[in-house]
Image (tube, rainbow, N blue to C red):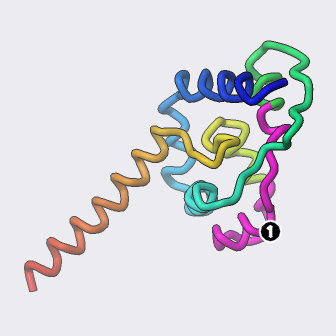
Amino acid sequence: MDDGLYQEKLRWFKENEKPEVVLFVGDDATLTKIALAWTNATVKRPQELSPLRGDCESEVWNWLWENTSYSRSDLLARSGAFEHGFDAKLAILIGNRILYPDGTVNSFVQRFLREKVLRLFDTKSAKSKKT
């Protein structure tokens, strides 16, 4: 298996994103922290990819993650999340295709988080103008 196949399969998932996944991170601070930390994590692929055994979405998604390595402890530290329940939260983000195995995040989630930050700054700016 070559890098081209990996990129092709990953690109398909990115082109077929679902905006509804934003609802997972919208009200869950831990999911949000992990998603933000993911973009700063060191993510690697092995030199030799494992064979792709099927062509259905879930098999391809699992194959992409099989061929992805990252430091769980580093991600845990970067996110500031508690160790208890961390793996379950990470599984939610991976299973719902919010985190991508290349170190990026679903574009709808990324946009949502950026807008949330911008609203935060707008609110602070408006408050400081009143004083």
Q: Which residue corresponds to the image point at 66% horizontal and 36% vertical from the top-left?
A: 96
User: Considering the numbered disc 1 on the image, is that residue within a helix, a strand or a loop?
Assistant: helix
The answer to whether 80 appears left or right of 32 in the picture is: right
Residue located farthest toward the bottom when viewing the structure as drawn: 131
Q: Work out whether residue 61 or residue 31 is closer to the camera in this orientation and state it.
A: 61
Residue 12 locus on image (x, y percent)? 61, 21
What residue did someone put label 1 on? 73
Q: Is residue 44 located in the magenta-colored stretch of the structure? A: no
Image vertical order of residue 56 relative to residue 6, above or below: above
Residue located farthest toward the top when viewing the structure as drawn: 55
Image vertical order of residue 113 relative to residue 2, above or below: below
Mark 1: give few (<14), some (14-19) or many (20+) Cα within 10 Å: few
Residue 32 locus on image (x, y percent)? 56, 57
Q: Work out whether residue 107 or residue 8 is closer to the camera in this orientation and state it.
A: 8
The answer to whether 106 appears left or right of 126 in the picture is: right
Residue 50 locus on image (x, y percent)? 91, 30
Q: Work out whether residue 104 or residue 48 is closer to the camera in this orientation and state it.
A: 48
The answer to whether 48 appears left or right of 68 in the picture is: right
Q: Which residue corresponds to the image point at 34% horizontal and 52% vertical from the top-left?
A: 115
Residue 75 locus on image (x, y percent)? 71, 64
Task: Quadrant for residue 21, please give it.
Answer: top right
What type is the residue that disc 1 sits on?
Ser
Instruction: Identify the magenta region.
Output: 64-87
Q: Which residue corresponds to the image point at 9% horizontal and 86% vertical from the top-left?
A: 131
